[in-house]
Amino acid sequence: MKRTYSLCKVLFILTVTLLTSLDKTSAATALNPSTKTIFKPLLADPFEPRVAVMPWLGKSALQLDIGSSTDLYQNDNKTFAAGVDFGTYSLLRRKNNFKFPVDTVDYLFGINASWKKQINCKRLPFDEFSARARISHISAHFEDGHYDEDAGGWIQEAGAPHIPLTYSREFVNLVLALSSPGHRFYTGYQYLYHSLPDGINAHSFQAGAELSTPYNTYLAADFKLLPVWQPSLKKTRGHRGTWNLQAGIRLNGIGLEKVRVACNYYNGISRHGMYFYKPESYTTAGIIIDF
């Protein structure tokens, strides 16, 4: 709890310092938050703040994401920005009578800075370099969908840490990207400087690609190397590849420029904090709204 409070203080101080240090000529820009961020959100990264409804195919579960990244400040040339991130990532169980009890939910907030630069080199198939750095906090919680009313207690799973469990992480994340019209390739690194439970490897890695295809369709892939939890050791040892493959279509043709219909295949360590120890494999299909 003290760590979370300290992080909130740091984020608040950094945000206030940023805003108060801007010169007067940039004041109007700073006071006009924009969800059209300089660094475009990664399409297939399941940890991007977004609005999405993605039912699992063949399983009684549904992902509901609510969040957004906002640039609080953009310089006049639109080459540097600083902003905030807020997001929730929920896993709901589908029941009869249109009921969706929440099994688990993750909460994320933090600040970010992004930068981009044009590339003027005919030898390279890219025309832009961009980067984004984030300082973030994420916490996870079991909800009513993980509670067995008949047994009067939390649902305990074999090999899982005992519930109730406190889960929170504070981390720094950096993503570098090269892009050309309709295409982007990126790589990233994340350093975890505090976690509950402890014993988590501080380092994880990321890479991905986004390719535009005909008729407003696209393909995207996000790959992460994430620490693997060893129950017998009560700490992580080694890394496992975690894929999220996405194919979708942008609904530009009917005037819904910010709406995508997409299908995902996910395989690897669960994206939900309460299942940080658990490998998962599933397919989802639904709607994503880009702000």
Image (spheres, grey):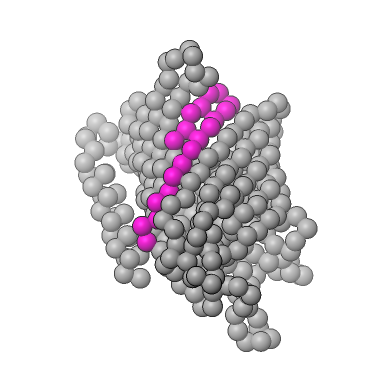
Q: Can you say which quadrant of the picture contains the N terminus?
A: bottom left
Q: Position of residue 221 (x, y in %)?
A: 61, 40
Question: Is residue 166 visible to the viewer in this orientation of the structure?
Answer: yes
Magenta span includes 184: yes
| Residue at the spot 51% in from the left edge and 44% down from the top edge | 206
Q: Quadrant of residue 160?
A: bottom right
Where residue 111 appears, x then y in whole percent? 37, 49
Residue 167 visible here: no
In this picture, residue 12 sits left or right of residue 201: left
Vertical relation: 12 (above or below) 187: below
216 in relation to 230, above or below: above
**Does 96 appear above or below 65?**
below
Asked whether, in this view, residue 112 is left or right of residue 278, the answer is left
Magenta segment includes 190 = yes
The residue positioned 50% from the left and 60% from the top of the image is 237
State how many labels appear.
Answer: 0
**Which residue is depicted at the point 68% across and 55% down?**
281
What residue do we see at 32% from left, 31% from top?
Answer: 75
Report the span colored magenta: 176-194
Residue 4 is drawn in which quadrant? bottom left
